[in-house]
Every structure is written in structure tokens, then in C-alpha cells.
Image: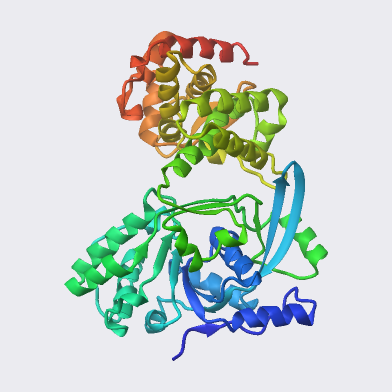
Amino acid sequence: MSLGKYMQPLRIGINSQDERRKIENIRQLPIKILQIGAGNFLRGFFDWMIYESITQGKYHGSIALTPPTPNGAVKLQQLAEQDGLYTLITRGVQHGEVTEHRSIIPVFKTFIDPYTEWEQFLQLAELESLDIIISNTTEAGLTYEPIDYIAGEPLRNYPARLTVFLYRRFQHFAGDSSHGLLILPCELIENNGDVLKQYVLRYADDFGFGVDFVQWIEQSQRFLNNLVDRIVPGLPPEEEYARLVEQYGYEDSFINTAEPYHLWAIQGEPELDKRLPLAQIGLNVHWVKDLQPFQERKVRILNGAHTLMTPVGLLYGKTTVRDVMDDPHLSQWMISTITEEVIPSLTLDEKELQSYATETFERFRNPYLEHRLQDIALNSLSKFKTRILPTLKAYTEKYNQLPAEIVYSLAALIVLYRLQPAEEGQPHQAQTLSGATLTIKDNREYIQRLAEHWQQPQLSDIVTSILSDQQIWEEDLTQIQGLEAAIVSNIHILEEQRQ
């Protein structure tokens, strides 16, 4: 049967017969993986892992690639035109030293556009060799919506499309339980595997696929909750790209960049590493019973550090995360806040948390990453509510006192959001301590409420009304003893530094 467009003989960046032979051997491997999405993250995370496993002789399969949306087909066509190959540059700081490594990744065997090649896409489900489905369709792609399914017509919704795909496999193999798949949605939502399975079961009922199919899904398919962590910036800036082209001697419009650090925690038994051999080759992949410790430390330490530093860094005129870490005063403040207030508030193993924090600070200092504070600042109020307030309350309950530096960051956030009402459709502007103007992007209702709170004449009244606004915080923060007075005091300190 025809299975899409097979990649052409490779050309770019291959300088030796041994290298060409090695890559062609990979191309001959059976298709074991269906990948939905060819964005920077999966190419700099999962596809790199598969290549490493193949190189070490532990994995013997290739990837069929499909786009998550109709617009993605153009990108896959461009990738096929350079033989399905792309360059991955892994660079950053490891153990205190700057490292850089280049790989040419050749794991894609075919690509299929399900929106114009629907039957060919469904034929993939009939492959005996198929074992894994992985996706990264963004949070917006992992949704349920009522759909009138017409046989033979492609579906844009990913869970619905997956349901029909699995139903073809169920029919082709007559419900044989041995043809179950590992299904790994890498979308950044909690319990992503459970959510995707729930949507598939709803569509199975909507489409009238029958009780036997539902039982086959329940008993034979493994939808695995998982947590991914790696910064993958993608194509370098234009000037840097030109330098790399000159250095490597070839053009590659799919050059991808990634930091050295990587983590994949998958909720499943360790024996599954035989099917997806990543931990056994030394990658930072963990098969675990409970994802909660990994989620908690990432949200509270990595994401929490970003949220804590952003309002302070922006007020002091910093542009990127690395700018904060390069400032002796701010970096020391950031590190001590995490080590002395965030980590003590957690119930996980302190030694592991300290090690994770050290890795996190090293990642923040990566000279190749331009992680803009204004990008992180998007929806800061919601981020502070989910990432920082649990730490503030846990620390206060445990030590019967407020975490002073976390309170300082909250005060900085309130000062940063000292906004003037804006006309409909116009952005809200904030000011740094030096008087520079910043655009604030957040929930418009929250911003308008804060602008109204700031119209009051007395600072103490402003702080009380902001902290007690349950539409923003979903609780009354004035109930935390001493928080109002501490915020007022810190705002005075910050305002005294205005130029």
C-alpha cells in the first residue's frame, strides 16, 4: 500500500560514506511511531531521543510524520524537500562549562497530510509495526467539541481524528488486544493522557463505534500521563543563522536549537522502557507511578522562579532571564528566595530539590537562550496565583511567618501593574523604576480592576482592595496575617527607588 511521500535520498551536511550509510540504514527501519506535529519542541526533544536510542542500537524503528493542522502540511513539504533531515544544535551550560554539539537527525521515513490524504493516513493504523503515537498539538489542540463525523472525510480535531484512526486499527486487527499502542500526548496540561483518553471515549460514543471498540480502548491502549521539560528555542536569529551556515557549509531552514537539560517523566511501569528504550541509554527519562513530585518541583521551582523574578527584573530594567542572573544583587536574591523560601515550603526530598534548583539556575545562565521577561510576564496574575501563592501560604503555615522575599516579589507585581485605564483595544502601559514604558499583557478584566484599585488615594486602601479582590485571586488574601502591612512596606521601598 502507498504510505505518503517517502523522503528522498539525503544530501545536506553529509560528508562521509559511513555517515550516509548509517542514515540510509535508519530509513530502512519499519515505521513504529506516528508523530503528530513537527514543531521545534518534538524535533528537539522526542525525535532527538529516538535518534540517540537508534544510534546506540536499542531502538529499531522510524517515524511517520503528520501535521496537527492543515497549515502544517506546507512545513512538512519543505522538510521533505531537504530529505527529511534537520540539524539540531544542543548548546548551553553543563556542570559550569559551555558546551555545543551538532547532530543531523534522520528519523523520519514518511510524511502524510491527513487533510488531503485521509485514506493514506488511516492506512498507517493497519501497520503491524506501529507501536507509539506521540503528539504536541499545543493545549488548544487537546480539546473536545461536538462533531458530525462523515466517513471518508478528514477531521481537524486531534482527539476526534485519533478516535477514527484507532477504530481503523480495531477493525483491521479484529479487536486483537496485542495491537494496542502507547499513546503519549506531550501537551502541557495536567493528566494529559487521561484527558486525551476521555475525549477519545466521548468521540467513540458520539460516532457510534460500539461497545466492543470502547472495551478495546480501555483494555488495550495505553494513554500515558507525562511531563516534558526542555527549552527548545528553534531557529537561531538571522545573524546567528548566517554564522552557522558558514561554519557548517550548508543551508538548513529547519535548524533547531535546544539546551542540554532535558527531563521526561512518564506515568507507567519501568518495563515500558523495553518498548521505548530511553532511560536505559542514559537519558533523563523516568517511568514513575506518580507524576505529582515532578510536576510540583517544576511548577514551584522552575516556573516559580520565572514568575518571581519577572516583576522585579522588569521594574529594574532587565530584559531577559539571563540579565537577571548576570546582575549580582538580583541573582543572589533569586537564588536565596528559591533555596530559603520555596524549597523549605515543599514536602519533597530536600536534597533532590536543591539539586534541581542548581540545575535550574545553570539553565537560566545559558548564554545561548534569550528568554524575554516580557514574554514570561504574559498573564502574570494567573501565574502568580497558581505558581507562587501555594508556596507563600505553605511557608507561612509551616514557619508562622511570611516569606519576606516572596512578599517582595508580590509587591513588585502590584507596583508593575500600577496602570492607567486604557481605551478599548489599546494596550495598558506600565513604568519601570527608571521611567521606561512597558506594555502589560494580561486578562483584560484583571487589568481593568487593578487600574480601578490604583485610583484610590491611600496606598493602604489600594493594597487592601487589590489583595481582597476574589475575582483575581479566587480568595481574600487579606486573611493572611500581616500580608497587607508587608506589601505596603515593600511598595514604599520600591517607590523610593524611582528616578
Judged left or right of residue 150, residue 41 is right
Residue 64 against residue 192 in the figure, above or below: below
User: Which residue is outermost to the bottom?
Assistant: 1
Quadrant assignment for the C terminus: top right
Residue 475 against residue 155 in the figure, above or below: above
Answer whether residue 40 is visible to the viewer in this image: no
Q: Position of residue 343 (x, y in %)?
A: 52, 29
Quick one: 105 or 330, which is closer to the camera?
A: 105
Q: Position of residue 393 (x, y in %)?
A: 40, 23
How are the residues colored? Answer: rainbow
Quadrant assignment for the N terminus: bottom left
Q: Residue at x 65, y 69 (%)?
A: 56
Judged left or right of residue 224, residue 212 is left
Q: Position of residue 194 (x, y in %)?
A: 33, 55
Q: Which residue is drawn at 48% across and 73% down?
A: 33
Answer whether residue 266 is visible to the viewer in this image: yes
Judged left or right of residue 23, residue 461 is left
Numbered label tally:
0
- The image quadrant that residue 460 belongs to is top left
Quick one: 457 or 462, which is closer to the camera?
A: 462
Quick one: 30 or 39, which is closer to the camera?
A: 30
Q: Residue at x 66, y 84 (%)?
A: 9
Q: Position of residue 153 (x, y in %)?
A: 31, 78
Quick one: 372 or 14, which is closer to the camera?
A: 14
